[in-house]
Image: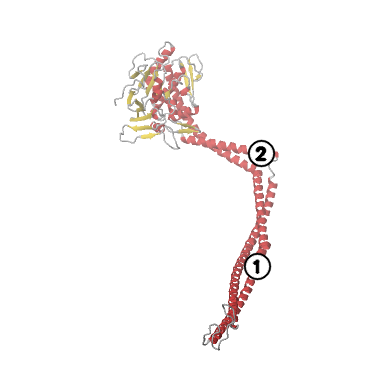
C-alpha cells in the first residue's frame, strides 16, 4: 500500500480570523440534511493540495486562505491555497522541519517541465507519473478514481466516470501494473505499425499510377537520362572552355582599357603644355610689338610744333632748345642712347619670340601625336570589346545556359526514374517496415504476456476482496468479477444474471455498493504487499441514501457503515490504517467506537459556524 495519508484538520481564514475542523479519528461522518454544506466541505477537503477538478463553492471563495494539515508516512505537512484565486500559487511546508524551505508551487504548469503542487503531493504519496498516448495521469485523476466518490456520480458513474483511458491508466499505476518500459515498447510498436501502414499506402498509390500509365517505363527513362547526362557533360566542357576564353578576353580588354587610360592622360598633359606654350608665345609677341613701336617713335624726327598750340616753333641758335630757348648740353647723345636701348630690347624680344615659336610648334606637334595615340587606343579598346569580348561573353553565356538546361533535364529525368523505380524500392521499404513492426510487436507482446500473468493474478485477488466487501454490504451477491483489462465489473445476485455496472439497478443502491466495494477491496489488496500504491484515505459523499428509511435501503446502509468502519480498524504504527471521511443525510443510528460525527445544519454550517482555531 502507499504511504499513510491522514488528514488532521482543515483550516480557513475569513475576515482575518482562522477557523478549523479536526479529523483526528480514522472515521468521520459529516451529518446533515440536503444543502447543509456537506458536499462543499468534502470538495474543499483536498482543495489546498492543488486539485484542478474540485468544485470551488462560494463558501470556499469567501475564505482568504484555505489550509490543510496532513501526515504522509508520519511526516506532518501543511498546504495553503487562496480561496478567491484558485490559480494562485500553493504553499507547501514540512511542519516537522520548521526551518525547512517552503515550496511555492503553481496549480498549472506555465511552461514545459515546471513542477506543480499536484506533482509535489503525488510524489509524496509515491504515485508515479504515467502517460499513454495523449493521456497523462495527475493527482486529479487519482483523486477522482481511487480517493474520492462524489455525490453527483456515486450512484450513477463507475468510479467517478470520466474518460475510460484515464481511469484504466490510473488503476494500472495504483495496482503497480504500469511499466514504463512496456509503455515505451507499446509506443515503438504503435509507431512501427504507423510507418508500415504509410509505406503500404504509398506503394498502393504508385501501383495505381503504374496501372493507369502515369508512370513511365524505367528502361526508357534510364536510356534517356544517360543520353542527357552525356550531353550535359559535353555542354559543361564547352561552358568551361568558353569561360576560360572569356576570362582571357576580359584580361586583354582590361589591358586595352589601361593603355587607353594612359594615352588619354598623356594627351591631356601635352594639350595643356601646348596651350601654355601658345599663351606664352602670344604674350611675347605683344611685348615685341610694343618694343618695335617704341623704337619707331624714337627714330622719327622731333616735332617742330608747340605741343600746346601746335604753331611752328621759332628758329633758335644752335645748341638752344626750340621750345624753351635754353641750352641743353648732350641732348643728342641721350636720344641715341634711347634708340640704342630700344633696338637692343627689340632684338632681345625677337629672339625670345623665336624660341617660344619653336616650343609652341613642338608642343602642338606632340599634342597632335598624343591625340592620335589616344584615339587609336580608344578605337582598339572599342573594337576588341565589340569583336572579341562581346563574342566571348555571349558564347560563355550560351554555354552556361545550355549546361544548366541540360542539368535540369537530367534532374527531371532522375526524378522520373526514381518514380518509375519507386515500386521496387517501396516494396523493400514496406518489407523493412513490416520486419520492424513484427519485431516491435514481438517485444511488446512478450512484455505484455509477462505482465498479463501478473495482471490476472492481481485482479483475481482484487475480485476476491471485491466479492467479500460486496457481500458485507449486499449479502445477496453470489459472484463478483473484475475484468483484468479495463477493470470493469460483473456482479451476480441470487435469482439474477450477472450484470455490468451500467446494467445494475439503482434499487437498493447496487451501484453505490459496487463503487464503495471496489475502493474498499483495493485497499484490502494494498495491505497484502507494497506493490499496490493506493493511498489509505477514502472520501465518500453520501453513500447512505436510505439510512433514514426502512427496508432494503436501510439495511444496506447499516451494513455499509460497518464495512466503512472495518476498513479503518488497523491501528498499527505501520501507516496502513485507512482514514474514511464520509457524508450522510441522517445521523448514525447508534454510537460507534472510533467514529466521529460532525453535525451540520442551518445554524451549524461547516464554513460559516466553524470553531475558531486556537493554534
- Residue 207 — which label? 2
Residue 316 appears in the figure: yes
Residue 607 or 446: which is nearer the viewer?
A: 607
Seen as rendered, the residue at the extreme bottom is 318
In the picture, the quarter occupied by the N terminus is top left
CA distance for labels 1 and 2? 74 Å
**Where residue 473 sits in the image (x, y, percent)?**
42, 17
Kindly state the secondary structure of the residue where label 2 is placed.
helix
**Where residue 40 sits in the image (x, y, percent)?**
40, 22
Q: Which comes sooner in the sequence, label 1 or label 2?
A: 2
- Residue 375 — which label? 1
Q: For this view, does 269 lie left or right of residue 610?
A: right
**Where residue 295 sits in the image (x, y, percent)?**
59, 81
Callout 2: few (<14), some (14-19), or many (20+) C-alpha neighbours within 10 Å? some
For residue 588, what is the image quadrant?
top left
Q: Residue at position x 69%, y 47% from top?
A: 221
Residue 114 or 147: which is nearer the viewer?
A: 114
**Where residue 108 sits in the image (x, y, percent)?**
43, 33
Above or below, 306 relative to 474: below
Amino acid at each position: 500500500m502507499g504511504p499513510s495519508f491522514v488528514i488532521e484538520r482543515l483550516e480557513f481564514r475569513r475576515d482575518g480570523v482562522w477557523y478549523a475542523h479536526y479529523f483526528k479519528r480514522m472515521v468521520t461522518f459529516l451529518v446533515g440534511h440536503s444543502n447543509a454544506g456537506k458536499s462543499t466541505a468534502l470538495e474543499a477537503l483536498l482543495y489546498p493540495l492543488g486539485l484542478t477538478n474540485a468544485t470551488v463553492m462560494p463558501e470556499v471563495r469567501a475564505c482568504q486562505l484555505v489550509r490543510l494539515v496532513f501526515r504522509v508516512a508520519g511526516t506532518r505537512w501543511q498546504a495553503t491555497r487562496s480561496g478567491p484565486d484558485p490559480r494562485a500559487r500553493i504553499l507547501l511546508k514540512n511542519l516537522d522541519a520548521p526551518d525547512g524551505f517552503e515550496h511555492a508551487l503553481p496549480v498549472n504548469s506555465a511552461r514545459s517541465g515546471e513542477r506543480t503542487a499536484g506533482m509535489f503531493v503525488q510524489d509524496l504519496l509515491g504515485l508515479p507519473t504515467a502517460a499513454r498516448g495523449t493521456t497523462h495521469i495527475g493527482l486529479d485523476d487519482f483523486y477522482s478514481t481511487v480517493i474520492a466518490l462524489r455525490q453527483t456520480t456515486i450512484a450513477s458513474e463507475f468510479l467517478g466516470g470520466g474518460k475510460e483511458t484515464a481511469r484504466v491508466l490510473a488503476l494500472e499505476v495504483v495496482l503497480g501494473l504500469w511499466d514504463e518500459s512496456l509503455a515505451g515498447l507499446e509506443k515503438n510498436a504503435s509507431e512501427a505499425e504507423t510507418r508500415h501502414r504509410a509505406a503500404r499506402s504509398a506503394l498502393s498509390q504508385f501501383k495505381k499510377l503504374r496501372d493507369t500509365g502515369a508512370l513511365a517505363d524505367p528502361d526508357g527513362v534510364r536510356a534517356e537520362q544517360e543520353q542527357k547526362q552525356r550531353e550535359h557533360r559535353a555542354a559543361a566542357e564547352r561552358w568551361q572552355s568558353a569561360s576560360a576564353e572569356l576570362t582571357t578576353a576580359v584580361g586583354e580588354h582590361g589591358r586595352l582599357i589601361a593603355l587607353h587610360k594612359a594615352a588619354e592622360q598623356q594627351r591631356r598633359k601635352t594639350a595643356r603644355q601646348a596651350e601654355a606654350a601658345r599663351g606664352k608665345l602670344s604674350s611675347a609677341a605683344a611685348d615685341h610689338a610694343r618694343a618695335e613701336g617704341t623704337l619707331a617713335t624714337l627714330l622719327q624726327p622731333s616735332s617742330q610744333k608747340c605741343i600746346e598750340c601746335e604753331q611752328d616753333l621759332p628758329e633758335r641758335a644752335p645748341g638752344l632748345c626750340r621750345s624753351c630757348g635754353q641750352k641743353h648740353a648732350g641732348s643728342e647723345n641721350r636720344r641715341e642712347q634711347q634708340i640704342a636701348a630700344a633696338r637692343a630690347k627689340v632684338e632681345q624680344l625677337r629672339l625670345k619670340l623665336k624660341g617660344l615659336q619653336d616650343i609652341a610648334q613642338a608642343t602642338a606637334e606632340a599634342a597632335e601625336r598624343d591625340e592620335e595615340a589616344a584615339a587609336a587606343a580608344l578605337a582598339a579598346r572599342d573594337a576588341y570589346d565589340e569583336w572579341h569580348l562581346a563574342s566571348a561573353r555571349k558564347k560563355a553565356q550560351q554555354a552556361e545556359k545550355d549546361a544548366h538546361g541540360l542539368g535540369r533535364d537530367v534532374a527531371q529525368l532522375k526524378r522520373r526514374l526514381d518514380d518509375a523505380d519507386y515500386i521496387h524500392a517501396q516494396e523493400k521499404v514496406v518489407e523493412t517496415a513490416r520486419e520492424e513492426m513484427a519485431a516491435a510487436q514481438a517485444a511488446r507482446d512478450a512484455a505484455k504476456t509477462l505482465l498479463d500473468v501478473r495482471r490476472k493474478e492481481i485482479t483475481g485477488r482484487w475480485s476476491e476482496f471485491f466479492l467479500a466487501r460486496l457481500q458485507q454490504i449486499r449479502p445477496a451477491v453470489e459472484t463478483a468479477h473484475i475484468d483484468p483489462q479495463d477493470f470493469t465489473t460483473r456482479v451476480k445476485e441470487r435469482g439474477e444474471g450477472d450484470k455490468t455496472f451500467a446494467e445494475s439497478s439503482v434499487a437498493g443502491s447496487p451501484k453505490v455498493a459496487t463503487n464503495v466495494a471496489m475502493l474498499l477491496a483495493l485497499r484490502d489488496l494494498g495491505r497484502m504487499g507494497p506493490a499496490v500504491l493506493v493511498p489509505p484515505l477514502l472520501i465518500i459523499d453520501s453513500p447512505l441514501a436510505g439510512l433514514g428509511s426502512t427496508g432494503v435501503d436501510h439495511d444496506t446502509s447499516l451494513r455499509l457503515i460497518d464495512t466503512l468502519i472495518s476498513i479503518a480498524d488497523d491501528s498499527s504504527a505501520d501507516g496502513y490504517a485507512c482514514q474514511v471521511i464520509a457524508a450522510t443525510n441522517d445521523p448514525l443510528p447508534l454510537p460507534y467506537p472510533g467514529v466521529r460525527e460532525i453535525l451540520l445544519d442551518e445554524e451549524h454550517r461547516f464554513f460559516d459556524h466553524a470553531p475558531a482555531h486556537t493554534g
